[in-house]
Image (tube, rainbow, N blue to C red):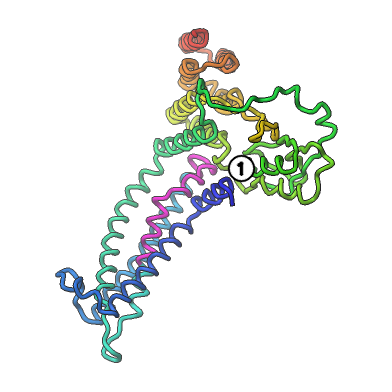
Amino acid sequence: MNNTKLSTLWDSLRSSYWFVPALMAGVAMGLAFVTVTLDQSGKSGPIENLGWVYAGGPDGARTVLSTIAGSMITVAGTAFSIVIVALQLASSQFGPRLLRNFMQDTGNQVVLGTFIATFIYCLLVLRTVRGDDYNVFVPQLSVTVGIVLAIASIGVLIYFIHHASTSIQVWHVIGEVAKDLDHAIDRIFPRTIGQRLLEPKQRWVEEIPVGFDEEAFPILATGNGYLQAIDNEQLMKIAKSEDLLLRLEQCPGKFIVQGSEIVKVFPGERVNEKLAKQINEAFILGLERTEHQDVEFSINQLVEIALRAISPSINDPFTAIRCIDQLSAGLCRLAERDFPSPYRYDDENNLRVIADPVTFAELLDKAFNQIRQYGQKDVAVIIRLLDAIALIATRTHRKKDRAALRRHAEMIKRSSDEAISEECDRKDIEERYLGAIKALEHR
C-alpha cells in the first residue's frame, strides 16, 4: 500500500470515534495481563515494599476495582452524551460539514478511550481476585495500577470539561479550520515563488499528440462518490510501464458518478480490462470530501461558517469577519506559492500525465463569491472584503492573480452601490475600494 492510500486510510481512522478508544482498550488488556502476571510470579516484591502499594484483602480489592469500573463506565457514558450535544450544536450553528472536524478531535477520542481502558483494566483484574473459598490471591500491584488509572481519569475528566467548553467556541472552530487550510496549502503547494529546483525540461502543449482527443480512450468510473485523492505515483507507474499518456478528467473534491470519464488514455488501443481496473484503483472515492488533496474543502468550510453568521436568523457579522480574516491569510499564502504545472514527466523526461491544477483565481472565487453575494448589504462585511483584497495584493506576484483580485474588488463595489443607500456608508466603501485598487497597482 503506497503513501496516498495510507494517508487516506489514516485520515478515515482519525475521523472515527472507535479507533483510538479501541487501541487504548487493547493497551489496557495488555497492561492487565502484565501486572497480574507479575503479581502471580511474585516478582513485584520490591514494589510491594513501597508504602503506597495496596495492601488490603480480597474483599477490599473487589470493592475498589468494582467501584472504579462502575464509575468509569458511568463517566464514559456522560462524556459520550456531552460529545453528542457538542456535535448537534456544531451542526446547527456552524454547518454539518464542520462535524468532520469535531470527529477528528483527538482530545475527545483519548478521553473516551481513557475511561473505557480503565473500565476494561479493572474488570480483567477483578476476575483474578480470589478469596477464602480458593487459594487466596490479591493482585496488589494490579489493584494499585487500577487506582493510579482512576486518579489519571479524574485529571482527564477535568481536561475534558475544559476542552468541550472550548471546542464549541467560534474562535476555536475557525482557528482549527484555518490550521487545516494552512496544512493543505503546504502539502499541495509546497514550493514558494522564486524557488529554483533542478527539474527536467518540460514539453510545450504543442508537443501533445495532435489526434489525442480523437484517438484517446476514456476510462469510466466504476463507482459513485467524492474523489478524495488520486494516487499520482500509481498513475505514473502505469503510464510508464505501458508507455501511455494519461489526461485526468477529474480533480480531487469533485463528485464522481458511475460511468463518467475520469481519465483519457493515449493511445487508446492499448487499453484493456486489466488496465482500466488499475487506473480506477488509483482514484480513491468516499462518501465525503477531505482536505488531503482538496484545498477547496477548508475554504468552503470557512465560507459556510461566514454565510451562516450573516444569515438573517443569526445576524453575526463579527464571526463572518473572522472567517474573512482567515481566508485572507490563506489566500496570502496561496499567492506566494508556485502552482504546479499540469504536465508531469517520468524520470526519462517523457510526458506521462496531464492534470489541470486548481488556479488562484478559482480559489479566490470559492472564498469570496458567496460571501459577497449574501453579505452585499452588510457594510462591515463589504469593508473587510475590500481590506482583505488590499492585503492579498501586497503578497501577489503574478499579473493574472492581480487581475482576479481587481475583478473581485470591482464586483464588490458594484454590488454595494446597488444594495446600500446610505451615503456615508458608500463613501467608506469607496475609500476602501480605492485603497484596494492602489495596492493592486503598486508593484
> Residue sitting at 47 percent across and 15 percent down?
394
- Element under label 1? strand
Most extreme residue toward the front is 348
Horizontal relation, residue 377 to residue 107: left or right: right
Q: Main secondary structure of the magenta part?
A: helix
Looking at the image, which is closer to me, 88 or 208? 208
Residue 94 is a magenta residue: yes
Callout 1: few (<14), some (14-19), or many (20+) C-alpha neighbours within 10 Å? many
Provide the residue span drawn in magenta: 91-118
Q: Is residue 161 above or below residue 199?
A: below
The image quarter containing residue 361 is top right
Residue 41 screen position, x and y as percent: 29, 79
Most extreme residue toward the bottom is 133
Residue 166 is a magenta residue: no
Camera sees residue 313: no
| Amino acid type of the residue that numbered disc 1 sits on in the rendered structure | Ala
Residue 341 screen position, x and y as percent: 63, 27
Residue 322 screen position, x and y as percent: 43, 29
Looking at the image, which is closer to me, 71 or 244? 244
| Residue receiving disc 1 | 229
Residue 228 screen position, x and y as percent: 61, 43
Horizontal relation, residue 24 to residue 51: left or right: right
> Residue sitting at 64 percent across and 43 percent down?
227
How many tags in the picture? 1
Camera sees residue 79: yes
The image quarter containing residue 319 is top left
